[in-house]
Amino acid sequence: MNYFAILLLYKDPGERPLHALGAELWQGQTQECKLQPIHCFGLTGGTIREYTEQVLEAFSKQCGTSLNKYKDIFEVSPEKCPIRPCPLHPES
């Protein structure tokens, strides 16, 4: 089975700020690893890019194969952000 990584971007559609991001490593239909999302407040585009590249490197080491890019990038509504505390969910 081939390994692949997906990137989850918690953001509103269009050119909106990135609220949070997470990543997952899959082998076929089995999730092998899930990186808990992090908030992106105050992070620059360069810092985010470097972080996502570091995640790919870590996933590559974990599965013993080279992952050069994310197979898919999914945009998820910030309302579904699982991080607590979160400014979108002050009651939590």
Image: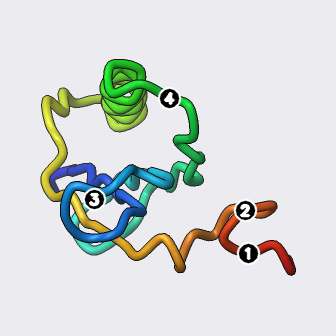
The three-letter amino acid code for the residue at tag 2 is Cys
The three-letter amino acid code for the residue at tag 1 is His
Please name the residue that numbered disc 1 is placed on.
Answer: 89
CA neighbours of label 1 inside 10 A, class few (<14), some (14 to 19), many (20+): few
The kind of secondary structure element at disc 2 is: loop
Who comes first in sequence, dot 2 or dot 3? 3
Q: Tell me: residue 88, above or below residue 54.
A: below
Who comes first in sequence, dot 4 or dot 3? 3
Give the Cα separation between the discs numbered 1 and 2: 5 Å
Q: Tell me: residue 12, above or below residue 67.
A: below
Q: Tell me: residue 4, above or below residue 62.
A: below
Please name the residue that numbered disc 3 is placed on.
Answer: 27
Locate residue 79, reporting x and y percent: 53, 78
Cβ–Cβ under 8 Å for marks 1 and 2: yes
Give the Cα separation between the discs numbered 2 and 3: 31 Å
Give the Cα separation between the discs numbered 4 and 3: 30 Å
Residue at image x 36%, y 72%?
76
Give the Cα separation between the discs numbered 2 and 4: 16 Å
Please name the residue that numbered disc 2 is placed on.
Answer: 86
Give the Cα separation between the discs numbered 4 and 1: 20 Å
The three-letter amino acid code for the residue at tag 3 is Gln
Who comes first in sequence, dot 2 or dot 4? 4
Residue at image x 85%, y 77%?
92
Residue at image x 40%, y 65%?
31
Please name the residue that numbered disc 4 is placed on.
Answer: 43
The kind of secondary structure element at disc 3 is: strand
Which tag is nearer the camera, tag 4 or tag 3?
Answer: 4
